[in-house]
Image: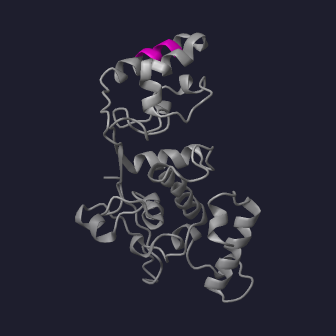
Amino acid sequence: MPAYHLTVFPLAAWAKKKINKIRRSFLWKGEENANGGHCLVNWQTVTRPKDLGGLGVPDLDRFRRALRLRWLWQEWVDDSKSWSGSELPCSDDDRLLFNSSIIITLGDGAKTEFWHHNWLDGQAPRYLALNLFRLISRRNRMVQQELRINNWMHKLGRKITSAVHIEEFVSLWIRIQDVHLQQGVQDTIIWRWTNDGNYSTRSAYRIQFKGSLVPFHDMTDHGRVSIDTDPCNPAVSHSCRCEEL
C-alpha cells in the first residue's frame, strides 16, 4: 500500500487486521499463515522501536497519525498549497498530538489559527472553551482576524444561552486581554522533537511511544523493576513493571 494513501484515507479495520496477519506470519514463520502458537512476542511489543524493547516493525495506527500530522505542519509553513484553508483529514487526537508537539510564538497573528493552535497560555482555545467552540461555524480563522475589533465575541452573539457558555466566555475573554499582537512580526512555530525545530515523520512516530516504556537501566537505577522468573527454566521471559516517574 502506498504510504501517501495513509495520509488521506482511513485504513479499514479489516484491512489493518489482514496486513498485520501477513506481517506476523512472515516474521514468525516465513510463510503465508501463522497461528498464535508461532508468535513468540505479543504484537504490541513487536511494533515498539528497537531501543524501547521492540523489534521495530511499524505500528500502522501510529504511523498513519505521524503521516497525518504533516498536513498540519505544511498548513503552517506553506500556505501556498492549493488545499490551504480546507478541512484537513485530521482527527481531534491528531490535533492534540500536534499541539503538544509544537511551540508557537505569536507575532501579528496572521498564521496562527484562533481556535485550533495552542497560542493562548500554551493551549488551544477550542479546548479551553469546548462548548463555545461547538457554537462556531467558521473555525479556521486566524488570531489576527478574530482579535480585530473582537470578532470572535461578535460571532458568538446570541448563541450564548447557558451558564456554561457564559462561564467559558468570561474565562476566555480574561485570558485574551493579556494578548498583544506585534504588527509586522511573523508568528513562528517550532517542532519540539527535532534538533532543527522542523517536523519529521520519524519524530512524530516515535513520540507516540513516549512514556510507554522506561529503558531497563533506568528502571534498575531507581529500583522500580519487578522480575518474575520460572526457577525451573531461567530462559522463561521476564515480565518487568515500572511505575511512572
Residue 161 in view of the camera: no
Identity of the residue drawn at 66% across and 84% down: 26
Prevailing SS of the magenta stretch? helix
Q: What is the x, y in percent for residue 129?
A: 49, 25
Q: Residue at horizontal 65%, vertical 82%?
A: 38
- Looking at the image, residue 206 sits to the left or right of residue 46; the answer is left
Q: Residue at x 33, y 20 (%)?
A: 177
Q: Is residue 31 above or below residue 5?
A: below
Percent position (x, y) of residue 109?
39, 35
Q: Residue furthest bottom?
A: 30
Quarter of the image holding residue 64? bottom right
List the single residue furthest toward the left.
221
* Picture colour scheme: one colour
Seen in the picture, residue 147 relative to 116 is either above or below; the reply is above
Q: Is residue 195 left or right of residue 6?
A: left
- Which of the pair 93/29 is nearer the observer? 93
Q: Is residue 37 above or below residue 133?
A: below
Farthest residue, direction front:
184
Q: Quadrant of residue 161?
A: top right
Q: Is residue 40 left or right of residue 112?
A: right
Q: Nearer the viewer, residue 150 or 72?
A: 150
Give the image location of residue 223, x and y in percent.
26, 62
Q: Is residue 140 magenta?
A: no
Please report the bounds of the magenta region as a residue range.
165-170
